Amino acid sequence: MDSATRRAWSWHKQGLDGSLAGSDAATVLSLAGWARSVGGANPYLTLYARAGIRREQADADVAALRIHELPTARGCTYVLGEDDFPWALSLGRGAAEATVKVLDKLGVERGEVAALEAQTLEILRDANGPLDPKQLKEQLGEAVRSLGDAGKKKGVATTLPTVLGLLQADGRIRRVPVNGRLDQQRYAYTAWDLSPVHESGEDARAMLMEKYLGWTGGATLKQTQWFTAFTVAQTKAALEAVDAVEPEGLWMLPRDVQAAEDFTLPPEEQIQLLAGSDSLFLLRRNAVEHFAGDDGDRALLNTKVALQADLPDHPIVDRGRIIGLWQYDPGGQRIAHWLFEPPSAPVSQRIAEVEEFIREDLGDFRSFSLDSPASRQKRIDALNAAAGQR
């Protein structure tokens, strides 16, 4: 498989070729990969690019718990579908438990943590609606211990965040976005009675491995370990559990091997504007492989665009190949973009469509919660300048 076909194969596995058009949000996230959130707009564009789902529908799915943002692999938060909630949540339990060890080093015994868990859960179960951390702290009073300067140095100012993380990892509470939107990081908490997971740790790891290899269409051992945070032994056991094979240096599901061999590069353009944190790149952190020819050697702000593990700008992509970069300029209500070659009609049309989607549905397109028009203005100016010099 040559590089262009390999890129298009990943594109196809991600459902970016139109194969997921008309699917609901939970189906998209199940088949193409959980959407990384961090308070940015990636989940919305993930759903729009693959299935044409607008923000209003996505927010309705969040409110109805058809999709939800949960901590899972590596303890990171992703938006995923309801069928994956219990077992995916179990994968993030280790990260939640790790903070307990930090508290222990600061002199907080596990019994104190358990008592605060019980009190917090009782308050949330009796509450008339979700409570934010400030409201919880007020009601819990002295049960929440301040950890002083020593705690601040370790990122734990009080005992409450650790307790909230533990309760969330067990499915006893969940975070609720205060305005119902995924592209911000202001949350309240509410009680939740998610059915406990019955799978063993080995089973959950095998389930994630099967999902991951299906989402990517194949990944190296190193890429697999980066996403899952499994140990070498756990990774090998999970690969064996799903009967994965390793043709051409990539671990793949058996059902994908023949499909990949039969796959051919689609002849027509398939244009998408994606977030830099889209699953196409984030799952394997292989953005460099999505540049063709000398495109990766092009420089923006004195840095080659392919030298960074995570894209600082959002990509314009055709069948898996990055053909340009973009940022949203809310002041001009437009997409600032730099195309490596003059645009075709499909490229111009898709830029206009995504521009309208962001303007009408989102208002802005943040990469993460603290992203702002001011913080990205330098990159917007650089994209405009690069476009003018093409």
Image: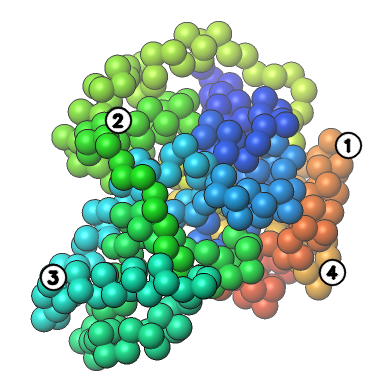
Q: Residue 206 carries which label?
A: 2
Mark 4 or 2, nearer chain start: 2
Residue type, numbered disc 4: Gly
The residue indicated by pointer 4 is: 332
Label 3 and label 2: CA atoms lie apart by 31 Å
Closer to viewer: mark 1 or mark 3? 3
Q: In this view, does 383 lie above or below 236?
A: below
Q: Which of marks 2 and 1 is in front?
A: 2
The CA distance from mark 4 to mark 3 is: 53 Å
Lower sequence index among marks 4 and 3: 3
Asked whether the viewer can see residue 86, the reply is: yes
Identify the mark at residue 110; answer none if there is no mark.
3
Q: How far apart are marks 4 and 2 (CA)?
A: 47 Å
Q: Mark 1 points at which residue?
A: 345
Residue in the image at 27% along x and 26% along y: 239
The count of marks equals: 4
- Is 32 placed above or below 333 here? above
* Pointer 4 or 1: first along the chain: 4
Query: In the rendered view, how is the structure colored?
Result: rainbow
Query: Is 56 on the left-hand or right-hand side of 314?
Result: right
Residue 62: image location, x then y, percent: 59, 53
Label 1, secondary structure: give it: helix
